Amino acid sequence: DVIILSFYSDCIGTSCKRTGEYEVEIAEPLVYNNKIGDENVGARSIESSSMSFPLTYKPQQLYRWRPAPSVTPVKGLPGEKGKPVIIPAEEEGLMKEKFTINQFNVMASDIISLNRSLPDVRLEGCKDKTYPKLLPSTSIVIVFHNEAWSTLLRTVWSVINRSPRPLLREIILVDDASERDYLGKKLEEYVKTLPVSVIVLRTGKRSGLIRARLLGAKHVKGEVITFLDAHCECAEGWLEPLLARIADNRKTVVCPIIDVISDETFEYITASDMTWGGFNWKLNFRWYRVPQREMDRRGGDRTAPLRSPTMAGGLFSIDKDYFYEIGSYDEGMDIWGGENLEMSFRVWQCGGILEIIPCSHVGHVFRDKSPYTFPGGVSKIVLHNAARVAEVWMDEWRDFYYAMNPGAVNVPVGNVSERKALREKLHCKSFRWYLENIYPESQMPLDYYYLGDIRNVVTQTCLDTMGRKSGENLGLNYCHNMGGNQIFAYTRRQQIMSDDNCLDASQKYGPVKLVRCHGMGGNQAWVYDEDERTIKHVNTGSCLQKPDKSDMSLPLLRPCDLSRGQQWIMKSKFKW
Ligand code: LR7
Ligand code: MN
């Protein structure tokens, strides 16, 4: 194989000077199952023709690669091809007992091969996509606290088995003060036997996943950092589409589609490519349906990169230098939570791009509960982290967070001045810009008149969602002044909303329901008259009224009659 190579040097910013051209013979084929060493990373220069040339990487930072061979299923082994594993009835007791150790079925995990095969879950259109022949390499950073052996090592093996070897620089395992013997010497000895370079770092004392990742990142030798949780399985072809995207624009932060590995059976279940990341008023990360707007931008191509307002947080690739340029992570965040939204807002507001790459799939064991301790208390830590996000990045919309989580007001956020200075230094845009341009579908209303509780003049009780779901009735309860379920926003689009849901009525005499906000007016349009203190439903012309004796917790909708029972107080000052 003789190809023409051009040499580029002096790469500054996005431009490289072309300094020469010559012929070389490529020493192919590359050897798999061999330690990565600088000897066999393949050609390290840039091809003159063909590819969209990643100007931001120097020639010596690019590696020739070819797809990793598929893992062949082993007949007779449980869980092959991502199939579910069923534990025999007689072992069910033990299975349940062991479940609580990790909050997943570790017995099922333990009997599945560390090298198990997976189905190729990619869309047809992904399978014959081509990527640049030369790509930057990545180091994989996996942090863990008390992870099970089989899930941790299956993560490692899935990386080894399914990554093009020259693109896999090393795997960095960061032990965040685990209290399991097997994660000590035994792990260190084990990784020495692996066919790629794997190092184990230890935080020493419990640091939380954010600071543990920062420790791992410090040791990264590859051009790109790829973070994974410690209970993942990378599927075929997962890596190259991620790296290709970064090579194309190093300010792109990319996530795979996160498939589901069942916490009960370890079945590999493909996730939808029609969901993206959002968040609610509590600042929980949540999946939502991709809006038509984004489908249109992608020309209806489901294999095209999807611009996502937020990311789940655990699985993503980022150019190493860019990771530091935009402020890595907030070191003031403890244990778990918040860092995913923090990085999402920061990337978008400070000039980057956040994408889900539908052709890249990685499975993750989703669990209902956290298995480990949160020193200092779960809610305190999670609220602390989220408050830092709100304070630094969300401008006035931080009020939604505090209104929804009144407990957060008393949790110290610590010092955020450094993070605010970072925002200044990078000339990051406002949260309004983010809502207008990146996430117009957000539950955070762009313009709103009021945020607070809504009290009836006669009963002195407050509208209350009672924590009910979409489709259920609005409630009324004694005013507790604790925010949460009694917090509503009255918006310029005439909605009265609580997080995802809006007050909605379709008939003159009610009922008033909570329904997923659609932003189209209609049954969800209300007008508050500050003088009359009435809340009038636009479509029916009826007014919201106090309940009658039969059910004091059910607000009514009745023809407007200027009675005191139809008067409501939105007590804080109107914004306009
Ligand atoms: O103190 C800790 N130290 C750690 O090293 C706590 C956790 N960890 C490790 C832990 O062992 C695991 O490997 O950090 C990793 C993530 O912790 P999980 O698995 O308990 O988190 P999660 O999967 O429940 O939560 C998601 O949100 C987190 C918010 O802080 C992180 O961003 C996780 O990485 C993230 N996981 C994903 O994005 C996978 C998809 C889940 C979704 C949605
Ligand atoms: Mn996880």
Image (cartoon, rainbow, N blue to C red):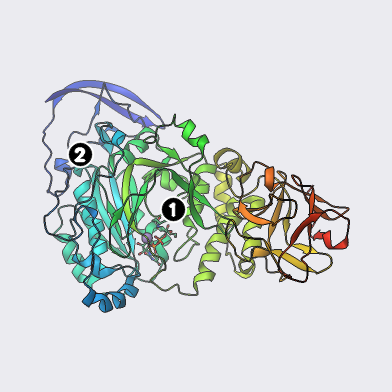
Q: Which label sits on residue 344?
A: none
**Dot 2 lies on which element?**
loop
Callout 2: CB less than 8 Å from ligand 1: no
Q: Dividing the picture into quarters, in which one does residue 416 lie?
A: bottom right
From the top left corner, tell me how far across and down residue 5 is, in percent. Answer: 21, 24
Up/down of 485 relative to 66, above or below: below
Up/down of 135 relative to 513, above or below: above
Q: Which of 97 and 246 is in front in this view?
A: 97
Residue with the mark numbered 1: 312
From the top left corner, tell me how far across and down residue 398 is, in percent. Answer: 63, 55
From the top left corner, tell me how far across and down residue 228 is, in percent. Answer: 33, 54
Residue drawn at x 26%, y 48% as measured from the top left: 235
Residue with the mark numbered 2: 67
Circle 1 residues within 10 Å: few <14, some 14–19, many ≥20: many
* Residue 369 can be seen, yes or no: yes
Residue drawn at x 65%, y 63% as measured from the top left: 465
Q: Nearer the viewer, residue 386 or 326?
A: 386
Circle 2 residues within 10 Å: few <14, some 14–19, many ≥20: few
From the top left corner, tell me how far across and down residue 415 is, in percent. Answer: 58, 62
Q: Nearer the viewer, residue 329 or 463?
A: 463
| Rendered-image quarter of ligand 1 | bottom left
Query: Left or right: 346 with respect to 504?
Result: left
